[in-house]
Each structure stands twice: as C-alpha cells, then as structure tokens.
Image (cartoon, rainbow, N blue to C red):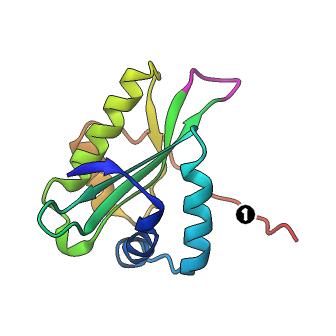
Amino acid sequence: MLRPLALSDAEALQAINELALGYQFPLDLTQQQLKKLLGDDHHILLGFEDPSSGRLLGYVHAEVFDTLYSETALNILGLAVLPDYQNQGIGKRLMQALEAQAKSRSYAFIRLHSSAQRQSAHAFYRKIGYNGDKLQKRFIKTVE
C-alpha cells in the first residue's frame, strides 16, 4: 500500500537505507533529517507498506528541481526497496505514484542519478521508461 512517509518510519528507513543501498547513517540523524524533510513542501516522501503486517518495505524521495536552465521538474534523491521484496513491483509502484504527483503539479520531467556500479538499478529505470543520457562524476568537499 502506498502512503506518505511519517516520522514514525525513521527506524524502518534507516534499515532500508542500510540493507538496500549500503548507507550506514545513525538513527538519531535519520530522525532529524526526516523531520526536516517532512516539513518542507519541496520534498516528496512516499512509502510502500505491506498491508497485512504494516511493515515499510520501500520508499521514494524526490525534491523539486528548479534551475535557471530548465523547466521545473522532480529530482529523485532516493528509491529503495528491502532486498527480500525487490522484483515484486514495489519500486515500479513507488515511481508511478511519484510520476502521478509530477504530472498533477505540471512538472516537465523527472530526473535521477544512479551510481555507475548499480547495473540492476539501471536496467530497472530503463524498463520503466527512463533514459540514461550522460555519465557524470561527483565531486564533494567537506565544509568544516
């Protein structure tokens, strides 16, 4: 069942991020980030819950993408489904729900970045109609 994420989902989200994406991030910081993002209408956070158990199985997180060089769109920041529940249509349903929100808000497109080694994710995105249009490098500088 699709539903908006809630602050009570923090522990499940932390587990999904670690098991599905390999990100280890402390629960207290997950809670802080989730609280902040839930209060920001430029972020869309949708979850997929098992209707019988109430367990959160996956989620998608997108932000409004506004620049001086394109029309307003959505930028997907995260899509993750617990490994034991992948290939069951959950990711597709999350993406379809996000696409419906983008359409209802008259956004021009949805974009995302996917790490070069995530070949199965690339196949999934192509299968649901997304086209990979360029290769990029990420540059990070820690600000202290």
Magenta span: chief secondary structure: loop
The percent position of residue 105, horizontal first and vertical second, equals 44, 22
Residue 133 shows in this picture = yes
Q: Is residue 136 visible?
A: no
Q: Position of residue 50 (x, y in %)?
A: 18, 63
Q: Residue furthest front?
A: 8
- Which quadrant of the structure image shows residue 84? bottom left
Q: Residue at x 19, y 52 (%)?
A: 1
Rendered view: 120 above or below 94: below
Q: Quadrant of the C terminus?
A: bottom right
**Which of the 4 image quadrants contains residue 85?**
bottom left
User: Which residues are drawn in magenta?
Assistant: 67-72
Task: Judge by depth and name the residue closer to the eye, 78 or 125.
Answer: 78
Who's the residue at 37% across and 64% down the image?
118
Is residue 108 positioned above or below 141 on the image?
above
Inspect the image, locate mark 1, and give the three-letter code of the amino acid beneath it.
Ile
Relative side of 4 to 136, left or right: left
Q: Residue furthest right?
A: 144
Task: Give the image location of residue 16, x and y in percent.
Answer: 37, 72
Question: Residue 126: image x %, image y %?
Answer: 27, 44
User: Crowdedness of circle 1 by 10 Å Cα count: few (<14), some, many (20+)?
Assistant: few
Q: Which residue is mark 1?
A: 140
Q: Secondary structure at mark 1?
A: loop
- Whether the magenta-drawn stretch holds residue 70 is answered as yes
